[in-house]
Amino acid sequence: SARGFAQHHSQQLSRAELPTRASIMTVTTTRAAAHEPAEQPKDEIGASEFIRKYPSYDGRGIIVGVFDTGVDPGAPGLQTTSDGKPKMIDLVDCTGSGDVDTSKETELEADGTLKGLSGRSLTVPAEWPDRAAGTKYRLGLKRAFELYPRPLVARVKAERRRRHDETQRAVAEEERRKAALGPLPTAEGEAGRKGAELVARVSALDACDKAYEDGGPVYDVLTYKDESGVWRVCVDTSERGALGEAALLAPFRIEGKYGTLDAADAASGAETLCNFAVEVAADGARTTLCVDAGSHGTHVAGIIGAHFPDTPELNGIAPGCQIVGFKIGDTRLDGMETGTALVRALGAAIERGVHIINLSFGEYAKVDDIGRFTAAANLAVHKH
C-alpha cells in the first residue's frame, strides 16, 4: 500500500467538509467517484480556493481517526503535516488479529541468547536498552500468514513456491542423473543395494514435492520493558534468531517508528513490503502487531490528509491534519469489520482525543441505525 498510494486517487470524496477547530467529535462517511488518476476534485468543490484564501485552515490542530483496514505508516504523503508535525500519531489494531500471546517469561543465558518458542536461539544485541529491574523477557510466536492480507499471502506463496521449485528441481535432476548412471537395483550385492538407494532417493524427492505445503514464515516475538519503563518489541524477521537485524520498536504513539516484515537478507524469502507497528498490553502478556488488512485505509487516509511538499497537487483535502489509524477490518475475515472492533475503536478514539472519525466501511443492512455501535457512536458524538 505504501507504493500504490498515488495510483489510488481515482476514488474521491463525494462531499468535502474541512474540519473546524471544534472539540466535538463528528462522524463522516465518504463515497467513491471516478476522477483523473492521482488527482482529487479540489477545484470543483472549492477546497483549493479555500486553502489559497486561508492557508492555515488546512486541518492544522485537527486529529482525524480513520476507521478502516489500517493505515500504512510508511506511505508517501503520510509522513508530515503542512506545518511540519508527524502525520501519523498512532496505529491501533482493534480487531485482535495481530495479537500475540507473550505471557511466557524467560531469562537471558550467560552467552547473551535465549531460546525462542520456535526453538531457535535468539541473540539479544548488547546495544539494546537494558531491562527494567525485576522484569523478564517475554516470548511469543506468530505465523506471518496470519498477519498478511490475503492478496499478499497469495503473492508470497507463489514466490516462495517458485524458489522452492528451482532448488527442488536442481536436486531432483541430479539424483535422477545418478540413478540413471548408477547400478541397477536388480544387480547383486552392494551394487544392487546402491542402485536401490538411488532410486529410492528420486521417489522420496518426488513424494515430498507432491506433498509440499507452505506454512509461511514463523516469527519469534520478544517483548520486554526497558529501564525507562518503555515496552520494547522485536519480531525476528530473519527467522534465524539474528535480532540485531530486526527492528526494536516501542509502541507507535511513543516513538513513531515501525518495522517491515521482511528479512534483512532479501534472498531468504519473498519481499513483502508489509509494514507493522506494535502495542503492548496486559503488563506485557499480550503484544499486538498492527498490520494492514488491505490498502483501503491508506487510500482513505491519503484522500483526507496526504501532504506532498513537492507535489501539492497530490495533497489530500486537509494536509495539515494529523491521523490516527484504527484497524477495524479483521485480517482473519478478509478485512471485514466486526461490531466488537468498531466499539473498541470508538473507545480508543475518545482516549486519543480524536476530533473527526472517517468510516468508509460497511455492508448493506435491512435495518439501519440500531445496535450497540450506533448507540456508542451517538454517545461519542454528543457527549465526547
Image: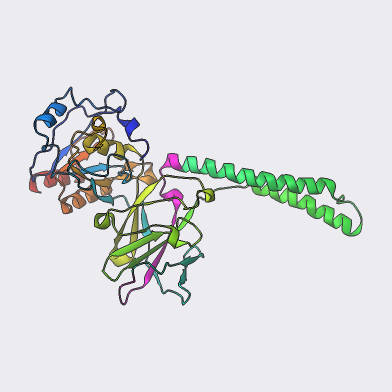
Q: Looking at the picture, how far across and down is residue 138, in whole percent?
A: 38, 67
Quadrant placement of the N terminus: top left
* x then y, percent, for residue 38: 30, 28
Front residue (pair 308, 29):
308
Query: Range of the magenta residues?
Result: 130-152
**Residue 79 can be seen, yes or no:** yes
From the viewer's perspective, tell me whether residue 4 is left or right of residue 354. Answer: right
Q: Quadrant of residue 316?
A: top left
- Which residue occupies the extreme front position in the image? 310
Magenta segment includes 276 = no
From the viewer's perspective, is 248 left or right of 17?
right
Q: Residue at x 87, y 55 (%)?
A: 192
Q: How many marks?
A: 0
Q: Is residue 206 left or right of residue 157?
A: right
137 magenta-colored: yes
Q: Quadrant of residue 165?
A: top right
Question: Could you tell me residue 12's position as x and y percent?
Answer: 25, 28
Q: How is colour applied across the structure in the image?
A: rainbow
Quarter assignment of residue 321: top left
Is residue 220 among what the camera can see?
no
Q: Residue at x 31, y 77 (%)?
A: 134
Give the residue drawn at x 65%, y 49%: 208
Report whether 100 appears left or right of 230: right
- Residue 279: x and y in percent read 30, 57
Residue at (89, 51) in percent of width and height: 186
Reply above or below: 8 against 250.
Answer: above
In the rendered image, the residue lying farthest to the right is: 188
